[in-house]
Image (spheres, rainbow, N blue to C red):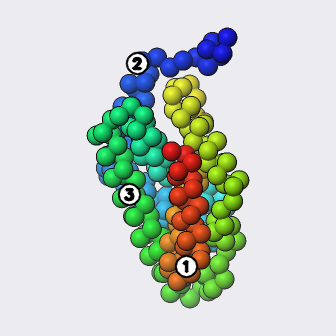
Amino acid sequence: MIRRWMQPITRERKAEVIEELDQASSPGFDYFLLVMLSCSIATLGLITDSSAVIIGAMLVAPLMSPILGLSIATVVAEEKLFRRALLALGAGILLALILSTLLGWIARLLPFDVLVNLPGEVLSRTHPTPFDLGIALAGGAAAAYALAQPRLSAALPGVAIATALMPPLCTAGIGLATNNWEVTLGALLLFITNLAAIS
């Protein structure tokens, strides 16, 4: 009865999922462009304290794909996919940190008195709690299930919002730009928590 409800994945669908993740995890032009755009949107949303803008950045961010690629590569022992996803994730994280730090630094130089006091959207991402871990665990499970079931692919944007990978990274960059190590380390801890739980 449970098997009838669960609808086991066919061998063909498994191969399709691996192929999709292999392509989505490739560190190519599209991937890096989306990292830069989502990082810019998220950083500016954090600086202006706009939750709506930050949600938009989460929808664009492509970091979920290499994390899922790492996970599936580990399960099915795909060494090439693992290396490619690891390279894409590492390069994406580094690019987002550099770009968000640069944008934060430029924002401080402009005569608009931004980042004199850190916005609430920044501060809310500096103290991870067990609830954040639970959200990321559920989000990772939802992403894996939605990816495996082609009719549920529309659920993936909602998962991207729930797991929030780009905003903590950009918060860490703002912390670097403002020389606030408490903000940087807290945001990086939230990002690592989300990354590990999703994986």
10 Å crowding of disc 2: few (<14), some (14-19), many (20+):
few
Circle 1 SS class: helix
Q: What amino acid is at disc 3? A: Gly
In the image, farthest residue toward the left: 80
Which type of secondary structure does the marked residue at label 2 adopt?
helix
Nearer the N terminus, badge 2 or badge 1? Answer: 2
Q: Is residue 110 above or below residue 12?
A: below
Q: Position of residue 16 (x, y in %)?
A: 40, 26
Instruction: Judge whether residue 185 can be spotted in this image.
Output: yes
Q: Earlier in the sequence, mark 2 or mark 3?
A: 2
Q: On the picture, is 140 further left or further right than 19? A: right
Image vertical order of residue 22 relative to residue 54, above or below:
above
Question: Is label 2 or label 1 in front?
Answer: 1
* Residue 167 position within the rendered picture, expressed as x and y whole percent measured from the top left: 57, 61
Q: Are marks 2 and 3 in contact (CB under 8 Å)?
A: no
Residue at mark 1 to residue at mark 3: CA–CA distance: 21 Å
Quarter-wise, where is residue 119 in the image?
bottom right
Q: Amino acid at mark 1?
A: Trp
The relative height of residue 20 versus residue 35 in the rendered view (above or below) is above
Which residue position is annotated with label 2? 12
- Estimate how packed mark 3 is, as few (under 14), some (14 to 19) or many (20 or more) residues with alpha carbons within 10 Å: few
Q: Residue at x 55, y 71 (%)?
A: 185
Query: Which residue type carries mark 2?
Result: Glu
The front one of 55 and 91 is 91
Where is residue 188 shown, x and y percent of the image? 53, 65
* Residue with the mark numbered 3: 90
Mark 1 or mark 3: name the one nearer the start of the chain.
3
Q: Which residue is mark 1?
A: 181
Q: What residue sits 50% from the left and 20% below the top?
A: 9
For image coordinates 54% across by 73% down, the residue present is 184
Coordinates of residue 176 in the picture (x, y in percent): 50, 78
Report crowding for label 1: few under 14, some 14 to 19, many 20 or more residues within 10 A (C-alpha): some
